[in-house]
Image: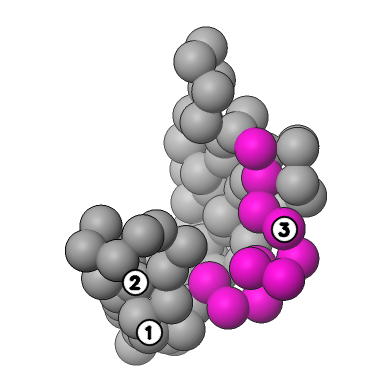
Amino acid sequence: MPQGGKITITTRKLEKEVEITTSDTGAGIPEEIKKHLFEPFFTTKEVGKGTGLGLSLVYEIVKKHKGTIEVESEAGNGTKFVIKLPVEG
């Protein structure tokens, strides 16, 4: 993210779920990359600089808890991840 960028994390309780949103003012994610984000071992980093497991693990954890995760991003306009988890009780 460029110097002076901003990361925002918000939470809110909806009727039957909790929503966790993380957004940034970074460079965004091109469509070609976005469609692979949750695949195990997918990375845009150079060899030896990452495992490509972070977002695939997040996806599996959210799914295991019967939740959803979505990404909204456009190159040059930042990125937003929205996680929704059901609330029991």
Magenta residue check for 32: yes
Q: Is residue 45 visible?
A: yes
Identify the mark nearer the N-term, 2 or 1: 1
Magenta residue check for 78: no
Task: Choose between 84 and 2: the one closer to the eye.
Answer: 2
Q: Name the dominant secondary structure of the magenta segment.
A: loop
Amino acid bearing label 3: Pro
Q: Residue at x 57, y 40 (%)?
A: 23
Q: Secondary structure at mark 2?
A: loop
Q: Secondary structure at mark 3?
A: loop
Colour scheme: one colour
Q: Residues within 10 Å of mark 1 (few under 14, many from 20)?
A: some
Q: Is residue 61 left or right of residue 80?
A: left
Amino acid bearing label 2: Gly
For the C terminus, the quadrant is bottom left
Report which residue position mark 2 lands on: 52
Q: Residues within 10 Å of mark 3 (few under 14, many from 20)?
A: few
Q: Residue at x 26, y 71 (%)?
A: 51
Numbered range of the magenta stretch: 27-37
**Residue 54 coordinates in the image, percent (x, y):** 31, 67
Indicate whether 83 appears above or below 35: above
Q: Which mark is residue 30?
A: 3
- Of all residues shown, which one is farthest toward the front? 47
Q: Is residue 65 visible?
A: no
**What's the distance in space between the residues labelled 2 and 1, CA to CA?**
6 Å
Q: Residue at x 42, y 68 (%)?
A: 43
**What's the distance in space between the residues labelled 3 and 1, CA to CA?**
18 Å
**Residue 82 coordinates in the image, percent (x, y):** 58, 57
* C-beta proximity under 8 Å, tags 3 and 2: no
Q: Is residue 29 left or right of residue 51?
A: right
Q: Which mark is residue 40?
A: 1
Q: Residue at x 67, y 45 (%)?
A: 28
